[in-house]
Image (spheres, rainbow, N blue to C red):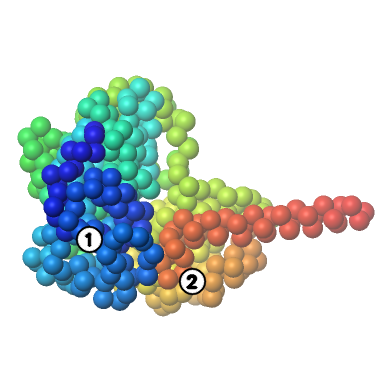
Amino acid sequence: MELKVLKPVFEGRRCVILGFGREGRIWLDILRRLDCCAEIAVADIKQQDIGGVTLHCGEDYLHKCRGYDLILQSPGVIIKDHLPPEDKAKILTQTELLLRLKPCKIIGITGTKGKSTTSALTHHFLSYCGFKTMLVGNIGVPPLELLEEMTEDTVAVCEMSCHQLEFARHSPDIAVLLNIFPEHLDHYISFEAYAEAKRNICRFQGAGDTAIVNSGITAKCGGIRVTAAFGKSADIWTDGEKIVLFGKEIPQEDIRTKLRGRHNLYNIAVALAAAVTAGAELGECLEALESFSGLEHRLEYVATVNGAEYINDSISTIPEAAIAAVKAFDNTDCLILGGMDRGIPYDILGDFLNTGIVENVILLPDSGERIGALITNLEVNVIHARDMEQAVREAAKCAKRRVILSPAAASYGFYKNFEERGRHFKQLIKNMRYYTDNYKESNSNDR
């Protein structure tokens, strides 16, 4: 699609870019290339050095957005009730603009957990089947970054976060809503407000569209709705062993995958359904499944040191994800939890840990304090660590079989994002392996 089709959206208007991260930079590039705005401004909490634009920086940057014709929001900027309704009505996101333009067929995928794996897997299936496809959105590529490469025969798989969907007024051709759990409560006035943002993915669909929705979620959509679930009361389901897709059971021997965990069978089932709905052949998708290795920071094997495996699941930001990680690996004897405390409930995680399924639980600030208070089983060895370095050292002392970093908490305040947290964990393990191997080699040479 040619960029000039965006000109009517911005021509003669005063536009402020809210948040100057990766999406903010794409917004600025687009506006500068169009060269049609009456004014371009950037508002961000951090001081910026950008030529040729009006700058609003500092603690009150949100309030300085008032009076502009369009507020071009970047995901992650907390709006809550900081802007009045008349200003919220001016918010435009890249996700909304992509959905409004519909330059190609769009598969949108969201959910509190599993959306990255399901998005990447859907893209993998389509690519293997010969489709012209691209993976954009919350997975790392801003929705409009590849706009000029999109043509009518493209299938764009777009991972959509709650932040990208909050102000959406259009929905994708194929919408996937995997699940909704309490999350990002620091960004929303209530859990229901967060859930409503997620539901926008299918709320505005038309008669020819398809919504694949978890059967436990109430969500209105104007298109064809199919349900997906664990159990047997859905159009698409898995019982943790086999998959049934639109009434057809897939033989267990055909589900050859490197992905671990019962939850990933659900993600596989939904990704298969999305790809088949887009026109892919089921048999070819199943062939492709075997070559999909999963994503970094998602139940990622790091190394084995002194007989103990180390698993990086830094993507885990909610209790359900940590529980799923432990269930995916039998005989896990050490779990590292904790991070930014956003006030999400941890009762379900406390109950799970009190069964004694994990012998050693290492807790990081700040949410680790609350998690620790819920562990009442005296046979569980609870260790409080001040930072990741100490957590890894403590894990090395007590782990005999497997250590999983699955924080059940956000990384902010301690790390830039979950990727940085995961990379730090992996580097600590690699350093430990290096020094352990060198020590063994040195001792061997001494003999």
- Which residue is at the front of the view, 121 or 157? 157
**Amino acid identity at mark 1:** Val
Foreground tag (2 vs 1): 1
**Amino acid identity at mark 2:** Leu
Q: Residue at x 35, y 23 (%)?
A: 129
> Which mark, residue 138?
none
Residue 387 image position (x, y, % from top left): 54, 71
The quadrant of the rendering that contains the N terminus is top left
Q: Badge 1: few (under 14), some or many (20 or more) residues near its Cα, within 10 Å?
A: many
> Which mark, residue 16?
1
Q: Residue at x 50, y 64 (%)?
A: 336
Q: Residue at x 53, y 56 (%)?
A: 423
Q: Secondary structure at mark 2?
A: loop
Task: Say which residue label 2 marks.
Answer: 364
- Which residue is at the front of the view, 85 or 216? 85
Separation (CA) of disc 2 from disc 1? 38 Å
Asked if residue 68 is positioned above or below residue 202 in the image, the reply reads: below
Asked if residue 255 is positioned above or below residue 48 in the image, the reply reads: above
Which badge, 2 or 1, is on the more N-terminal residue? Answer: 1
